[in-house]
Amino acid sequence: MDGAGQAKLILTGEHAVVYGHPAIALAVRQGVRVRLQAYDGPTHVVAPITTDERLHQAIDTVLPSTGIQVHIESTVPTGRGMGSSAALSVALVRAWANWQGQALTPETTYAAAMKVERIFHGNPSGIDNTVSAQGGVLWYRKGPPIHFEPLPTPDWELVVLDTKQAGDTKKMVQLVADRFKENRSVLEDIGQLVLEVREVLHDAKELGRCLSLNHTLLCQLGVSNNDLNALVDWSITQGAYGAKLAGAGGGGVVIALTPTPDTLIHQAKQAGISAFKTRVTETSWQ
Ligand code: MEV
């Protein structure tokens, strides 16, 4: 029995969303698929072979302790801010519901996936698992009760540039929390910027300007690093309208908005930078 969840990129509003500000997230092409098979013995993961205790806890949270073999296939790079754990959480919850012949509503999917996300991230806002289950472009505000709204899909494509370093979401969220007093006004500025982004979502040039501004604010929060900053600066010198880190930071990816994505990818390859193009994807992973 199968279940799947989609990967995501946060267009704007990461970290501030944890404190009740709005954010905009995009579901993208990549995703995670979980396959469950009947087994005469304790429930366990067959593939991938992993020592990540959190994965075992996630399995224990959703599935019964005996009778199932779990196969996980993922096209989401882990620790890169692309929501690999949220996609896994949604996939696991859906696979188990399918196994039981149970119909999930969107609300029960987010709620069950949120329990699993907490194992990975401690205090998540819920944006990752919500967009992973929902697909498309999502305006999101943390609850309770959570509020989300699909936004019209823009026609631009993003270039994703990978630092190849894994960031630790739990650690980065804690870092922002530890300096909350100093960070408060920056988080508010991010919240304001998200309102502006919503207005210019379909104007790539203006949106690019906002993305770069968002990156500056994330730097002020202390969640960027030299490699992320170098990729942002490099994209701008190559003609991108704007760029920012996407996700919790401390590693992971940069997203760049450019009038010529293929050229930027070509230039990235020549510069030895790992890059790929992506666009918003409606729910294709169920
Ligand atoms: C992680 O993808 C986004 C953060 O805002 C954390 C969260 O919202 O749970 C950094």
Image: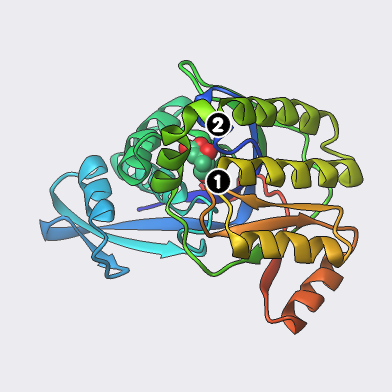
Amino acid type, label 2: Asn
Judging depth in this view, the residue of 150 and 180 nearest the camera is 180
- Residue at 54 percent across and 22 percent down: it is 20
Position of residue 79 measured from the top left corner of the image (x, y, whole percent): 46, 58
Image: 114 above or below 87: above
Q: Quadrant of residue 182?
A: top right
Position of residue 87 measured from the top left corner of the image (x, y, whole percent): 46, 49
- Residue at 63 percent across and 47 percent down: it is 219
Instruction: Tell me if 61 is positioned left or right of 32 in this view.
Output: left
Q: Earlier in the sequence, mark 2 or mark 1?
A: 2
Q: Quadrant of residue 203?
A: top right
- Residue at 69 percent across and 46 percent down: it is 215
| Residue contact at pointers 2 and 1, CB within 8 angstroms | yes
Amino acid type, label 1: Gly
Judging depth in this view, the residue of 43 and 184 nearest the camera is 184
Q: Residues within 10 Å of mark 1 (few under 14, many from 20)?
A: some
Q: Which residue is mark 1?
A: 222
Judging depth in this view, the residue of 21 and 30 nearest the camera is 21
| Label drawn at residue 183 | 2
Q: Is residue 232 visible?
A: yes
Mark 1 sits near ligand 1, with its Cβ under 8 Å away: no
Image: 274 above or below 33: below
